[in-house]
Structures are given as structure tokens and as C-alpha cells.
Amino acid sequence: EDQVTQSPEALRLQEGESSSLNCSYTVSGLRGLFWYRQDPGKGPEFLFTLYSAGEEKEKERLKATLTKKESFLHITAPKPEDSATYLCAVQAGGGNKLVFGAGTILRVKS
Amino acid sequence: KAGVTQTPRYLIKTRGQQVTLSCSPISGHRSVSWYQQTPGQGLQFLFEYFSETQRNKGNFPGRFSGRQFSNSRSEMNVSTLELGDSALYLCASSLAELVQPQHFGDGTRLSIL
């Protein structure tokens, strides 16, 4: 059974304090790994897709990396507006089914 | 470009009733998936439709069903509602069945009394 585990469950940072979120996965035949951001009362907002080990994607203060067993979301010099729940999901097998991790709640204080 | 639209945003029902939720995908997107989000279980896959055909189904009872229309709009139905069905129901659309990012709507918040 496909499984996704995210750590930590919650993370508090001071503005400007860089850190990383972890997503470890166990799947048969990974087709893609996705990072989403979810704000309270909203649906998940797509951030990145990673397809193969060694791949990296960047967007503003966020950088996602992928190995054969895990992915990291690096947040450089975060701002309060980066506060959200960050979700990791994997797509394996046929179709578009995503298996999600439980998420990391990020709080950035000014 | 309009995003994924879900209606209604909020619903309150009582046990035993049934409910229908609607999802309009991003224009041009043919794949629509539904997810249930609860504090205890997180985001769980319900089912996926592509070209009016159900392609995948998650591990939910038969009370949960869905369909997709020729214009790619989708509906999901839950019959004989139970207290445990209270959740945020999210719809996501993508371009095709290949590995493409899914874009989510803001969901329908269903509360069962």
C-alpha cells in the first residue's frame, strides 16, 4: 500500500529563519510527487511536481528536491505570509489518484 | 482563467438524508477527482472520472457515488448520511490522465447534525 509520511507535524519559525520540511514515501512505481500549500478555509494550491530522483524545482523562497525515498521542501528566509499547511502527495499506478501525507503546519512569526 | 468551482460552499444536513455536490473543472480539463478531508484522516481519495468514466475508486462505502457529464462537470452523491461524513469535500481537475498537477477547488463543507 502506498504511504506518505510528513515531518514535522508542526513547525514554528521566526521570519528569516530557513528550514526544511520532509516527505518520505513508500510507493510502487512513483509517477510523480506533488507539493501543495493549503490556507485555512481554502483548497490545496499546487506548488511543484517532481518526477525523478535528483530533480529540483524552485519558486520564490521555496525549493523542492526529490530522492528515491523522500522529498524535501526547503524554505529560505520565510515571511509570515508563508504560514500555511504544506501537503505532499504521490501519484503511482494508473489514473490520477493522489495519496497525501498528513501535512506540516508552518507558522512564521515576524 | 477561472479555477475549479465547487457548489455549494457549505451544507448542513441531518443523518439519513442524501446530498449532491457539484464541481466545474478548469476549462479544458477532462479529469476530475474527488477527495474527502477530515482532521483525523487528512485528504483521502474518493474517485476519479475521465471522459465520463470512473477510472479509480477509493476505499469508501457504496453510499458515495459520482458521475461526470459530457462537458466534464462532475457531481458526487452521498446517500444515507452519517455523522462521520462531516468533512470538507474537495474536487480537483487536471488536463488528462497523464501525470499532470491537479488543481483544487475550495471545497464544500458538509456538516451532519
Image (cartoon, rainbow, N blue to C red):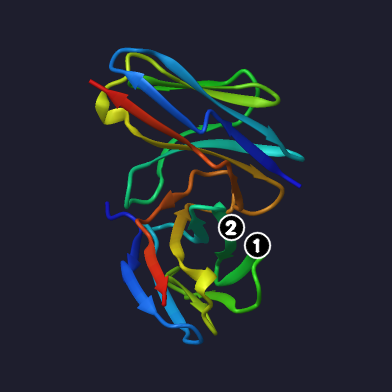
User: Mark 1 or 2 closer to N-term?
Assistant: 2
Viewer-nearest residue: B10 or A35: B10
On screen, B83 above or below A94? below
Tag 1: amino acid: Gly
Q: Quadrant of residue B7?
A: bottom left
Q: Chain of mark 2?
A: B
Q: Nearer the viewer, residue A4 or B52?
A: A4
Residue A34, which numbered label?
Answer: none
Q: Position of residue B82 (x, y in %)?
A: 53, 77
> What element does badge 1 sit on?
loop
Label 1 crowd bin: few (<14), some (14–19), many (20+), radius 10 Å: some
Q: Residue at x 31, y 66 (%)?
A: B9
Residue at the disc numbered 2: B45
Residue type at mark 2?
Answer: Phe
| Viewer-nearest residue: B35 or A15 | A15
Q: Is residue A92 left or right of residue B48?
A: right
- Give me the C-alpha separation between circle 1 and circle 2: 5 Å
Marks 1 & 2, CB-CB < 8 Å contact: yes
Specify the quadrant of the image occupied by residue B52: bottom right
Q: Is residue B10 above or below residue B95?
A: below
Reply above or below: A24 against B54.
above
Q: Quadrant of residue B23?
A: bottom left
The residue depicted at 69 percent of the width and 37 percent of the height is A30
Left or right, residue B53 beside residue A77: right
Mark 2 neighbour class, 10 Å CA radius: few under 14, some 14 to 19, many 20 or more: many
What's the residue at 50%, 78% (across, down)? Answer: B77
* Horizontal arrangement in the rendering, residue A67 relative to residue B100 (left or right): right
- Residue A59 position, x and y percent, is 37, 24
Residue B10, x across and y down, in percent: 32, 69
Q: Secondary structure at mark 2?
A: strand
Q: Chain of mark 1?
A: B
Residue that numbered label 1 is attached to: B58
